[in-house]
């Protein structure tokens, strides 16, 4: 036999020996799938300082979940999901919302801080996290209106046929909510905030409010007196909470020195009210920003 044949066989046997050592050194556990632990998040609640932050009304639809600062997923509430980690970990749960009430525009609401909790994950077990959050300490509240005071903070556009009435029959919470009622001969209502001069152009700015209406409701801003209609809130016979993102519409006129938010309904140019007497109810209005 030639020397080169001997060397070839020797290399082949060495190769088989190495493969065998690797194969047989692997334990059974190395080939078994890891059993995940499970985290359950039934809901996310909000706590506020009522005097400075207003109502704790919220509409948190999703949980953005981080484990040891790794994003493990975004889950619609209520949620239960597997996590391929075990032992003591730090769970951070951020609140997710529907931006402008649009189901396809789900975002993390950056004005809320996350819920942070240390948990011990065990494969096969489920741990429930009762998530509670607060507003970020850097959030600013430029406008709060809950209709509970002696008067309201609205101004009214020239030609508006009526004003907000405080009433206690239909409320989201508390003792009062605002009502707009248009009688037969009325076809226009528009209320605005006071002039706001410190909003950050290009910054995070949200208008939050609870509403119930039998007529489509228009929301937008005046920038130095120029009106920018932004969003239409569709009719609803139940109270709904919405987060209206004003960042882009305010940024559309970067040199504006004064901003007013407006809320209104109008019948003109072939747009006819759906109801003979439109009725709008609002509560817990906030303008929040960084």
Image (spheres, helix red, strand yellow):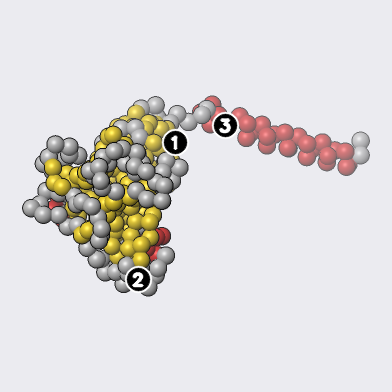
Quarter containing the C terminus = bottom left
Q: What element carries label 1?
A: loop
Q: Quadrant of residue 253?
A: bottom left
Give the CA separation, mark 3 to mark 1.
Answer: 21 Å
Nearer the observer, 260 or 111 = 260
Q: Tags 3 and 2 in contact by the CB under 8 Å rule?
A: no
Nearer the observer, 223 or 30 = 223
Crowd tier of the residue under label 1, counting other residues whose Cα lies within 10 Å: few below 14, some 14–19, many 20 or above: some
Task: List the residue tagged with mark 1.
Answer: 84
Crowd tier of the residue under label 2, counting other residues whose Cα lies within 10 Å: few below 14, some 14–19, many 20 or above: some
Q: Which of marks 2 and 1 is nearer the N terminus?
A: 1
Q: Which of marks 2 and 1 is in front?
A: 2
Q: Nearer the viewer, mark 3 or mark 1?
A: 1
Task: List the residue tagged with mark 3.
Answer: 26
Nearer the observer, 149 or 164 = 164
At a point 30% along the width and 65% down the height, the residue shown is 259
Q: Earlier in the sequence, mark 3 or mark 1?
A: 3
Task: List the residue tagged with mark 2.
Answer: 256
Q: Which residue lies furthest to the left in this view?
A: 150
């Amino acid at each position: 036999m030639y020397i080169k044949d001997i060397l070839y066989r020797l290399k082949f046997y060495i190769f088989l020996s190495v493969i065998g050592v690797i194969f047989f050194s692997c334990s059974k556990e190395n080939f078994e799938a890891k059993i995940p632990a499970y985290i359950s998040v039934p809901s996310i609640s909000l706590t506020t300082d009522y005097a400075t932050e207003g109502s704790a009304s919220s509409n948190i639809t999703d949980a953005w979940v981080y484990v040891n600062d790794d994003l493990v997923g975004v889950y619609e509430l209520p949620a239960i999901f597997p996590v391929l980690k075990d032992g003591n970990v730090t769970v951070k749960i951020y609140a997710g919302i529907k931006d402008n009430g649009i189901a396809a525009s789900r975002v993390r609401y950056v004005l809320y801080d996350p819920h942070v909790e240390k948990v011990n994950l065990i494969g096969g077990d489920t741990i429930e996290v009762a998530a509670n959050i607060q507003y970020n300490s850097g959030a600013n509240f430029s406008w709060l209106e809950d209709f509970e005071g002696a008067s309201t903070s609205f101004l009214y556009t020239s030609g508006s046929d009526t004003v907000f009435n405080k009433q206690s029959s239909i409320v989201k919470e508390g003792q009062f909510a605002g009502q707009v009622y248009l009688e037969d001969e009325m076809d226009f209502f528009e209320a605005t905030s006071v002039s706001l001069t410190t909003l950050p152009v290009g910054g995070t700015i949200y208008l939050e409010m609870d509403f119930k209406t039998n007529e489509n409701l228009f929301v937008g801003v005046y920038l130095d007196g120029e009106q920018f209609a932004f969003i239409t809130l569709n009719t609803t016979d139940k109270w709904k909470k919405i987060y209206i993102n004003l960042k882009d519409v305010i940024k559309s006129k970067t040199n504006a020195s004064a901003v007013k938010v407006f809320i209104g309904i109008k019948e003109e140019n072939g747009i006819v009210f759906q109801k003979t007497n439109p009725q709008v109810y609002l509560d817990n209005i906030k303008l929040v920003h960084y």
